[in-house]
Image (cartoon, rainbow, N blue to C red):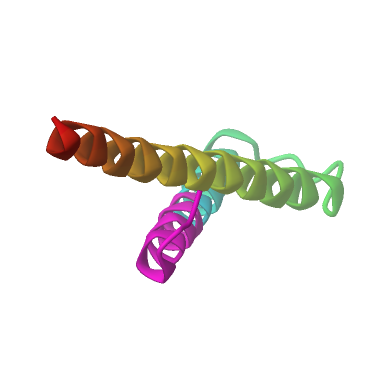
Amino acid sequence: MHANVDDVRLAGLTGGVVAVVSVVSVGLLDWWLVADDTAPILVPAAEIGAAVGTGVQFAVVAFAGIDLARRRTRLLSLR
């Protein structure tokens, strides 16, 4: 399986955007819902970790979707 550089860039961009949106939205929800500062370092660390994990998952799904679309297009063109 050979990946085009644009495919890798698009999957990485997808993951990055999802991670940023996730960290911002979870941060805003945390700020709005929880006014308690019992764990000032643990909560942001957990939020960033969750956002990075979500971004990586979306990047993998985007890359797999791009690869699947290329394979299907290649198979249909062989018929």
The vertical placement of 9 against 38, above or below, is: below
Q: Nearer the viewer, residue 51 or 77?
A: 77
Return the residue nearer the eye: 49 or 59: 59
Rendering coords of residue 4 (x, y %): 40, 64
Front residue of 74 and 37: 74
Q: Position of residue 22 (x, y in %)?
A: 50, 46
Q: Position of residue 78 (x, y in %)?
A: 18, 36
Which residue extends farthest front? 79
Q: Give the overall secondary structure of the magenta segment.
A: helix
Look at 45% across and 39% down and name the residue there. 64
For image coordinates 74% across by 40% down, the residue present is 36
Task: State the extent of the magenta-drawn residues as a range.
Answer: 1-18
Q: How many marks?
A: 0
Which residue lies at the image location 53% right of the left edge and 42% below the top edge? 60
x 44%, y 46%: residue:
63
In depth, the one of 42 and 75 nearer the eye is 75
Q: Quadrant of the C terminus?
A: top left
Residue 5 within the magenta-colored segment of the rendering: yes
Left or right, 75 with reference to 67: left
Q: Position of residue 16 (x, y in %)?
A: 49, 59
Magenta stretch holds residue 78: no
Looking at the image, residue 43 sits to the left or right of residue 60; the answer is right
